[in-house]
Amino acid sequence: MTHIAVLSLGKAPGTTVLAAAMTAEATHRAMPDPLLVELDPTGGDLAARWGMSVNQGTLAVTAAASAHGVAGAEHLNNAAQSAPFGGRVLLGPPGGDAASIAAAELGGRWGLVLSEWGSREGGGTVVCDAGRWSPRQPEANRVRSAGTVIALIGADLAGVDRARQDLPALARLIAPVPVTGLLVGGPFTETDVATELRRILIAGTVPWDQTTARAVLDGNWSKRASRSVLGRLANELLVNAEATSVPEGVS
């Protein structure tokens, strides 16, 4: 199973675009059963954009876990909907207390629940949009158990300062999985940030690719999108995640 969490430290934007692009590209590459999961405690964006119901989503999974003590593959399958670009999506509530509850209710058990997706025949590919992450959040352990953790970091003074404060707690939470950093905006270069944040691999910079970003948020993905700079980044991240994924039947 390939389980990826995409989060941001501080105010770095772009987790939804990157997570959606990775899921769309996973579908394009015919990876096993791609599933996009909205676990942003401030609210999901995609239900409104795609005209889909949030009643089938993370709230349904947490309700099943509360009622039955566990949420299995059947509950995930019932709660997931077909994404417009292919694959499936587990939508989060659009905001308010419901989004926080959906992310916090299972806490660190989200990893175990989502592993059920990979227990299906042929395995599975899960990409979580974890939104902004902080060790001070009650939902902070929602990214625990991911096999790949990608942190978006603002490439400016405020972004680096925030990352310096929060990275040690994130590293402890997900150990032994390393944090993969991607820069967003700002004047600092990858070398600048790597020098300041020695405990993290800076793997690159999220490109300013508004055309592909708009397309994937509208639910569209094509060969052209796959060949775009954002599409190539999504593919590279998926390849790296596959290389470190847990084979089916291995814990």
Image (spheres, rainbow, N blue to C red):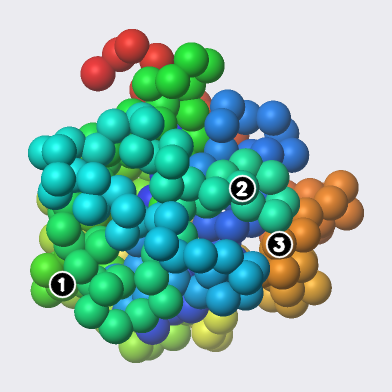
What is the three-letter code of the residue carrying label 2?
Ser
Distance CA(mark 2)–CA(mark 1)? 30 Å
How packed is label 1: few (under 14 Cα within 10 Å), some, or many (20 or more)? few
What is the three-letter code of the residue carrying label 3?
Gly
Viewer-nearest of labels 3 and 2?
2
Is the residue under label 2 in contact with that under label 3 (CB below 8 Å)? Answer: no
x, y percentage for residue 96?
29, 83
Query: Closest to the observer: 13 or 219?
Result: 219
Is the residue under label 1 in contact with that under label 2 (CB below 8 Å)? Answer: no
* Residue 137 tag number: 1
What is the three-letter code of the residue carrying label 1?
Gln
Helix, strand, or loop for circle 1? loop
x, y percentage for residue 190?
51, 66
Residue that badge 2 annotates: 82
Q: Residue at x 34, y 88 (%)?
A: 158
Q: Is residue 187 left or right of residue 163?
A: right
Looking at the picture, does residue 37 appear above or below residue 9?
A: above
Helix, strand, or loop for circle 3? loop
Residue that badge 3 annotates: 219
Q: Residue at x 31, y 65 (%)?
A: 197
Helix, strand, or loop for circle 2? strand
Query: Closest to the observer: 67 or 95?
Result: 67
Looking at the picture, does residue 55 appear above or below residue 13?
A: above
Quadrant assignment, res 235 = top right
